[in-house]
Image (cartoon, rainbow, N blue to C red):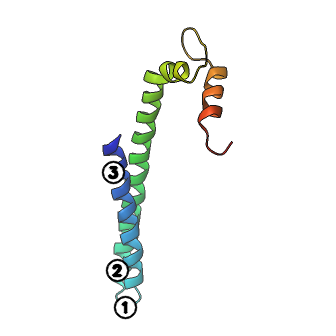
Amino acid sequence: MRTARQAYDAASQLVAWSTLYLALAAWWWPALLIAAATCAVGIRRGHAAMETFCLLAESVVDLHGRRLAAALGFPHAGPLRPGVGRDVTTQLRKDV
């Protein structure tokens, strides 16, 4: 997961650089092309990195969800059911 997060951070930095190139475009018009390309590449890489991150997070829940539910005191037998998942989510959410 760390590698996926680092890839997302790198993509975010690329988009940030594109805004700096956009500012430079006021004095040098080719910077506008560089800004557009840099932004497009950064967004594309960011989407790919976040997709990977989400798949990894989902896999972690698939592998360890039952243990987490048991540790939080939610009884269940067999695979996790939506009701138990809602109970775990309610317990762990910070905004509730």
Residue to which mark 3 is pinned: 7
Q: Residue at x 40, y 65 (%)?
A: 15
Please state which amino acid type lies under the numbered disc 2. Ala
Q: Which residue is at 47% across, 31% downward?
A: 58
Residue type, mark 1 in image: Trp
Residue of label 2:
31
Residue type at mark 3: give it: Ala
Along the line of sight, the residue nearer the viewer: 73 or 61: 73
Q: Quadrant of residue 74?
A: top right
C-alpha separation, residue under disc 1 versus residue under disc 2: 9 Å
Residue 50 point in image, percent of width and height: 43, 46
Q: Does residue 70 appear to the left or right of 53 in the view shown?
A: right
Q: Nearer the viewer, residue 22 or 16?
A: 16
- Picture residue at 52% right of the left edge, 22% below the top: 71
Q: Earlier in the sequence, mark 3 or mark 2?
A: 3
- The residue at the point 36 percent across, 78 percent down is 21
Q: Which SS class for mark 1?
A: loop
Contact check, label 1 and label 2, Cβ < 8 Å: yes
Residue closer to the observer: 82 or 96: 96
Residue 92 image point, x, y percent:
59, 35
Tag of residue 41 = none
Query: Foreground mark, 1 or 3?
Result: 3
